[in-house]
Image (spheres, rainbow, N blue to C red):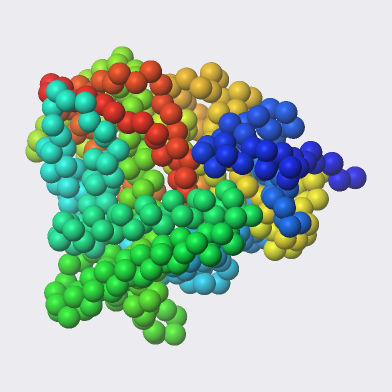
Amino acid sequence: MSKTIPVVSFLTVLKNASRILKNPLPFHNENFEKHGDIFRVQLGFGNSVLFTRDAGLARHALQKQHRNYHKSALQSKDLARYIGEGLLTANGEKWLKQRRLIQPAFHKKKLEEIIDTIQNVVREEVSNIVPDKTIDVYPLMSDLAFKVVAKSLFSYTDTGNTISRLQHITQTAQKTLIKEIRQPYKRWWFYLSGKTRSTLKLTQEARSILNTIIDERKNSGEQYNDLLDMLLESRYDDGSAMDNEQLIDEILILFTAGHETTSNALTFTLLLLALHPQIQDKVYAEVSKSTENISAMALVAKHQYTKQCIEESMRLYPPAYFSDRVAINDDQYDDIILKKGTTILISFFEIHRQAGLWEEPLSFNPDRFDPNVDKKEYADWYFPFGAGPRMCIGNNFAMSEMILAVAQLIKDYKVTTKLKDVKVQPLITLKPLESRLEFTRR
């Protein structure tokens, strides 16, 4: 017999519309606490979504039965409208084809080739910090992460107005999309008011910028041995190459996903270290021992406690704080029947904070990820980069970048804050709402 799933009515959604638009996480949490780990939300016009913080169901949809689940229209259509149909937004055979083509670029050997570039960008950005002054660290981390992607993956050195413009466009598109997602009943208004049209015009500008970068590379005749070279040289099984439109889709997705999640995670980590000076002191004790003549790859391997702090930060504040899937055939999980067409929204944010899974789940404790702790203790309910075949392709790249950035920052500066806690701004990714810190030279 199928289990009856609690329902949150569309009327309840409408009553809470303004707070959901501002920050839906408290609304989600209230319903999880009231209804349990799985409940259904009615969205109007006969549509509904199954919300879950059941880690078993998350593994079921993302990993064990992944072939039976596709990304929903939220990503495959709505997000794709603004950033193209590439690795992040494609489904089925197209996704598999693109994954096979791009996967080699993120192999460990490739990372070894570009990690010195990553370290140079980190050092350059850290040197721009104004000490003894309270600054908003998020724009700084956003610039750092964007330049790491531009320089290390695309060897792009014109990081002035071009890169700033790409950043502005991706952020504007995200704000438009989040309104469409959280207020689906107002999409007609976004369209008629011209908001959707003006955002699509901006994304066309971004595509034009990237098309110029691609053409410049093709015409240069030079080899940079970076991701762009590899994408230009890659061939599908039939011997054909990616056309410019598909290349732009993939590059736009790598710029958007590759920089945003990293800048969020870096900012949350620095905020947490500022709020926990004793833990920051332990990071400093580790990173201050490193010498200048050690390779960047060796530094990443050596800074284990720094890595644990980032892992714990991504547990509390996962940048990719949710994922969604649609059942493409009838399915069953335990005693729950999942009919074809069922949309499941998986809350990593809630899973990462469940008292039944984590000891003192709301506390910042990097020792959870000590190498001596058996990974079985948390492996099945920790999703910092997703799970299954669609797990983030750049997870090793991102983690190496973040370790180098946090290590350099804490080695050079003591980080403090007047903030009392961490406040969040959930958009497409989870962002910090406030991130004002002070850096004092060591």
In the visual, does 45 lie left or right of 381?
right
The image quadrant where one finds the C terminus is top left
Which quarter of the figure has residue 281? Answer: top left
- Front residue of this view, candidates 58 and 43: 43
Is residue 343 among what the camera can see? yes
Image coords of residue 132 (percent x, y): 14, 23
Which residue lies most toward the top here? 278
Name the residue located 40 percent from the left edge and 74 percent from the top edge: 246
Image coords of residue 384 (percent x, y): 47, 41
Which quarter of the figure has residue 138? Answer: top left
Name the residue located 41 percent from the left edge and 31 percent from the top edge: 313
In the visual, does 330 lie left or right of 350?
right
Name the residue located 23 percent from the left edge and 58 percent from the top edge: 163
Which residue lies most toward the front here? 193
Image coords of residue 202 (percent x, y): 36, 65
The image quadrant where one finds the N terminus is top right
Image coords of residue 213 (percent x, y): 23, 71
